[in-house]
Image (tube, rainbow, N blue to C red):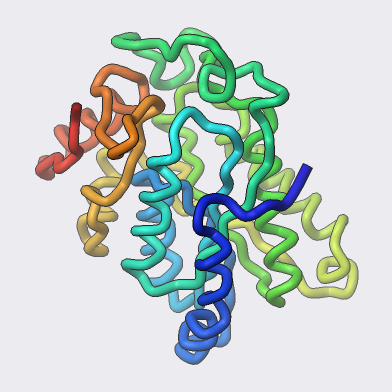
Amino acid sequence: MIVAPAGNAGAQTARMPAMANRNMSSSSKRAVVLVSGGMDSAVTLAIARAQGYACYALSVEYGQRHASELAAAQRVAARYAVAHKTVSVDLRSIGGSALTDDIAVPQDTDQSGGGGGIPVTYVPARNTIMLSLALGWAEVLGAQDIFCGVNAVDYSGYPDCRPEFIKAFEHLANLATKAGVEGAKLSVHAPLIRLSKADIVRRGNELGVDFATTVSCYQADDDGRACGHCDACRLRALGFAEAGVADRTRYR
């Protein structure tokens, strides 16, 4: 199932050791940060850096509808000059989601907060798989910390964005790894988990995150321009409006 280079990830990986050495020189604390290319993961990376971690950005090509978010992830990692790796997992072969199957992405609906049940944009096991990949790389790097941008407030009802899931995965990480068994406690951080989208915008703005480089849309075009109608676009736009911060999202 795993792991194949995605896009120009091979070139990125070839440059990674030099970047990683520069990154490590400023901090003895290493962390793997899941970076999707969206605004939440960009803010998460900025938070990890601000906390003094030497960060290693991990992106996953899982068969999503568009590659523009992976291009955005490259931009985010480059902006912070952190090591960046992209791996591939074929979730499209499993399907079951509007993001990985021939299922229409809902538009102009209010799915925030999960009031209407779990939406079709939920990707089965996605966060579990991504965190597992991050856990594997963390062991290789000798990192004891993993950061992810999941959110339990404006989260569209996804079950793998809840605090219970993060706590359970952290418990698993310490049971299932050589590092955990040998006493190196592994921690999974979700610094945005209790923040509203407006709070996330404000925090990112404080940390100087360039939101214009990020892509959140479920069906962005090849240039990363957003549809403006899917749940992700609506939550993002509402966050900027409520935060009173200019929205530099590019719409098609």
Quadrant containing the C terminus is: top left
Closest to the observer, 51 or 108: 108
Which percent across, then down, holds residue 150? 50, 42
Residue 48 horizontal side relative to residue 230, left or right: right
Which percent across, then down, holds residue 156? 46, 23
Closest to the observer, 12 or 118: 12
Above or below, 64 relative to 157: below
Which percent across, then down, holds residue 189? 56, 56
Q: Is residue 203 visible?
A: yes
Residue 106 horizontal side relative to residue 90, left or right: left
Which percent across, then down, holds residue 122? 56, 23
Above or below, 198 relative to 157: below
Above or below, 163 relative to 114: below
Above or below, 175 relative to 159: below
Quadrant containing the N terminus is: top right
Closest to the observer, 131 or 47: 131
| Residue in view at x 68 percent, y 41 percent | 89
| Residue in view at x 72 percent, y 52 percent | 3
Q: How many numbered circles does the render carry?
A: 0
Q: Is residue 147 visible?
A: no
| Residue in view at x 42 percent, y 53 percent | 73
Q: Toward which corner of the image does residue 105 lie, by quadrant?
A: top left
